[in-house]
Each structure stands twice: as C-alpha cells, then as structure tokens.
Image (tube, grey):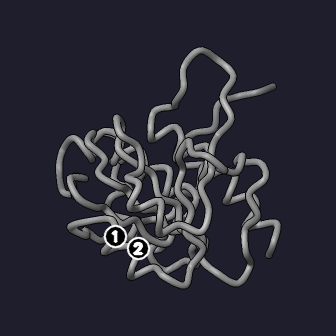
Amino acid sequence: MTRKVKNEELNRLTVEKYRKVSKSPLIVVLDNIRSMHNVGAIFRTSDAFRVEKIYLCGITATPPHRDIRKTALGAEESVDWEYCSNTAEALKKLQGNHICALEQAVGSIPLRDVQVPSDKKFVLVVGNEVDGVDQKVLDFCNEIIEIPQFGTKHSFNVSVSAGITLWEIFNKVNENQ
C-alpha cells in the first residue's frame, strides 16, 4: 500500500547540520531579480540541491524579508548568500570557475548538452524576469545555456528555469563524482 511519508520520517537536516555538510560545487547568481517570491523559491531549490552559495545582485532583494521567507520556507537561513551591488562585481569574485548564464542567445547550448567540468565550480547566472541576463553579464560567461521549449511561450518563470537547470546540473555533477 502506498502512503504519504510523514514529515518526521523525512530525516531533514537542521539548519546547523545543513551548514556543516559538504555542498555541491554549484553557485547561483541572481542578476536583478524583481520578485521576492522568485528569490525565495530559488533559495528553497538551492537548499534542496545543496548549492554552495547564492549571490544576490543589483535590485535583487535580500533576506530577511517576509515575501522571501514566504516561498523560501527558511532556506534563506540555511543557504549561504552574499549581496553585490551589481552582477559584474559578483562574477569578478567568481572568475576561474565555469560561469554559465541561462538565457536565449545566438549559440546557446541546450541544457541536456551542457558539459560540467569536474575541476571547477559551476556558476549559474539567472536574469531579470522581463529583460533576462544583461548583455554585459553574458560577456563574462564561459557558456550560455538554454532550456529548449516547445509551446507557444518563449520563457519559463525564472525560479522554474533555475529549478530545471539546477536539477540537471546537480545530476551531472554527481555523475562526475
């Protein structure tokens, strides 16, 4: 018989234990994300995949804020984060890693074809809900990743895009280990 698992059966880590466990070599950079709900959702997804750190850049809101907490459900306390006044500042700190933007661009690589280097951290840049990742930011990147889409719409919500991409990259990272 199938039954729903109770919360106490999930063996969730406490925030203290989460901070001590090894993290995936994944870093997320939020380039001017407008919606605090999207920020919170990305925190929550990042917690699930043990993302090493999130950089909140430009107009992206920072914790603590109730609208971030509403979707993060406390993940803003477990996942390490840092604010940078602009995305270029964050990417300068991350040089030497494999920096990829999630964007529709000429020459972008379909997500399924992305190669994850085993000797560098994987940095995922996701952009503004309306304008996407700024062109100046794209110029910092080693690759541009695109999620193929087959309907009438040309984009996913930024937190959905981040979730799909982090799941795929997390699996590829763990294949390499």
Q: Is residue 33 left or right of residue 172?
A: left
| Quadrant including the C terminus | bottom right
Q: Residues within 10 Å of mark 1 (few under 14, many from 20)?
A: some
Q: Position of residue 15 (x, y in %)?
A: 40, 67
Q: Residues within 10 Å of mark 2 (few under 14, many from 20)?
A: many
Name the residue located 59 percent from the left edge and 55 percent from the top edge: 144
Q: Is residue 76 left or right of residue 12?
A: left
Q: What is the quadrant of residue 57 in the picture?
A: bottom left
Q: Disc 1 versus disc 2: distance between alpha carbons?
A: 5 Å
Q: Position of residue 136 (x, y in %)?
A: 38, 61
Q: Secondary structure at mark 2?
A: helix
Labels 1 & 2 near each other (Cβ < 8 A): yes
Q: Name the one closer to the observer, 175 or 154.
A: 154
Q: Is residue 147 left or right of residue 158?
A: right
| Quadrant including the N terminus | top right
Farthest residue to the top: give it. Answer: 152
- Vertical position of residue 12 compared to residue 158: above or below: below
Q: Which mark is residue 88?
A: 1
Name the residue located 68 percent from the left edge and 35 percent from the top edge: 148
Farthest residue to the front: give it. Answer: 106
Q: Position of residue 93 (x, y in %)?
A: 39, 82
- Vertical position of residue 130 compared to residue 89: above or below: above
Q: Which mark is residue 21?
A: none
Q: Which mark is residue 91?
A: 2
Name the residue located 58 percent from the left edge and 59 percent from the top edge: 49
Label 1 is placed on what type of residue? Answer: Ala
Q: Secondary structure at mark 1?
A: helix
